[in-house]
Amino acid sequence: MSAEAGMQAWLESRVETWRQLTPQLNALERNRDHSAAEALQAIELYRALGRDLSIARRILPGSRVTQALERSYAKLHAIIYRKPHDWRARTAMLFRVEIPEIVSELRVAILWVSLLFVLSAGAGFWLVSRYPELISLLASEQMINGVESGRLWTEGLLNVTPSSVLSVSILSNNIAVSLMAFCVGVFFGLGTFYIIATNGLMLGAMFAFTHQHGLAGELLKFVTAHGVVELSVICLAGAAGTMLGEALIRPTHATRRESFQHAASKGGRLLLLCALLLVGCGFIEGYLSPDPSFPMASRVVVGFGYGLVMIGALTGHLFGRRFIKRAVAS
Amino acid sequence: MAAPQVTLQSITGVDVELRVAGVGSRSFAFVIDWHIRLILAFSWGLLGTFISFGGLTLAGAEPGPSFMFVVLLPALGIYFLYHPVLEIAMHGSTPGKRMAGVRIVTRTGDIPGAGALLVRNLFRLLDSLPFAYLIGLSTALFTAQHVRIGDLAAGTLLILDDNKHDKSFARLTSAHRSLDPRVADLLHELSERWAQLEEPTRLELARSLLARADKTLTPSELDGLNSAELWQRLQALLHPAQTS
């Protein structure tokens, strides 16, 4: 038998199997609930395809048939090696185990970022108290005129915008700020540093400015219900951002890229929880905070109550994580 | 310079090289997707406005919370969640990526998980700065594997994933048994590109291939065949059942 005839005979013996490949692979890709027999069949097909590809590469190098076999082989490889699909277990694992571990790992960074925020707020307060004209750099003219005439910009907010619309715009803005505080950590942490410091500076400056006009109490009243969690979440996102910077400055893996990827993956998981917490903050800020009928005591209860929810979520206990008693060596 | 590749390593020992998509394919896919999501979001907004106010004007009308939640928010949702939702649902692809023949894979060539795809999309915030994806585009231009910051963060790559070769199996019909498979492959390619090739080129290629495939033709007979006759001969070899 000549080489061509042998090649032809081999092609003829395999052609029917290959023609069935595309529908077979599509069915395997669509369905994620395969039986053991189907899985074994897929593995057998994978082996057979590997053999065919190996032969095709030798006798038909660079041909379209070889390229088509390569594509089918790569697709089947991806199907066989894809991760198990169990959303419930994966989500439970994320909120009960992974996020609390990330928070625990980030404890020191969270403290430093919070300290930076507090110091910036202090600096903002001092600057505007000492040089009141600086407020024009941080607040709009309309806002300044309102406060100078004894009216906080949050007053009558509900008369202008419905609570639902207000909530959505606030929560989307807060989520965008937090995500940005995280992402700009890629600039060796300096971007995060800038965003946290700017936010702290503005908060302190606004308190100083309202204090000068006897409205600091009103502003505190407005901020209390949502501020506890909102400001904490911004610090959490900032801490996640510093993790990105840290990964680039002091890589924990073989390369900076791997280290960055690892840090981004961990930070991204924490941000998911941050975004969920900010949705709650948005609704509080849209419905409760601008409503003057809510007394301060209720706001304190809501603010700190939601703060406890946040702590429960960060430690995983809110999602059913069990307390683990450590054995005490006697 | 050879295009960068990623090797899909298999337990069978038969590895496959996946070609990494360049900035052009990446941008082409993005532009298609951008148009799709813009058209979808805009259409939803227009339809919602029409249904809410009986026309395409907001003059004299007061858009309330229902308009915000039924019209504006879903339209923004379509625009901003198009990539993450479709990439997760379509295993690292989107309609635009399919059309451009590219797909997202992990650095080992596998299908990326939902977490990696979300992180990849999260960094669009940064890649899109200061405008028109300048940071992302610059990063893709200057990195060896043409990745943007989102890809670096998620550990993903964009590979070329053309499905035109899927037809190759269908072409292996019993009618080609008399042909050398290598020649049959070339004949199919020539047949597909016939109209795009210039006359002298296609005549030369057709004569050269027919000389290998059809031993009944002498060189002088081949030289005497015109374009239409050569085409007929090609088709007779490729589809003998239809031409007999």
Image: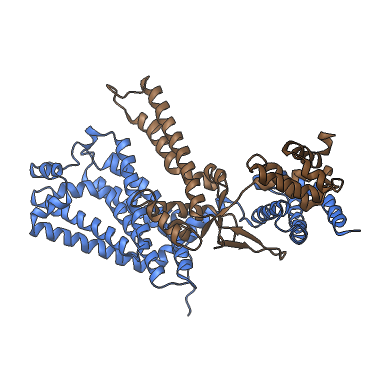
Residue B28 coordinates in the image, percent (x, y): 49, 46
The residue lying toward the viewer, choosing from B154 and B233, is B233
Quarter occupied by the N terminus of chain A: bottom right
Chain given the colour brown: B
Whether residue B192 sits left or right of residue B32 in the image: it is right
Whether residue A224 sits left or right of residue B221 in the image: it is left
In this picture the colour scheme is by chain
**Quadrant housing residue B223:** top right
Whether residue A234 sits left or right of residue A20 in the image: it is left
Residue occupying the point 35% across, 32% down:
B68
Residue occupying the point 41% across, 33% down:
B42
Q: Is residue B168 visible?
A: no
Whether residue A161 sits left or right of residue A321 in the image: it is left
Counting labels gives 0
Chain given the colour blue: A
The residue lying toward the viewer, choosing from A144 and A107, is A144
Residue B43 coordinates in the image, percent (x, y): 44, 30
- Outermost residue, top direction? B54
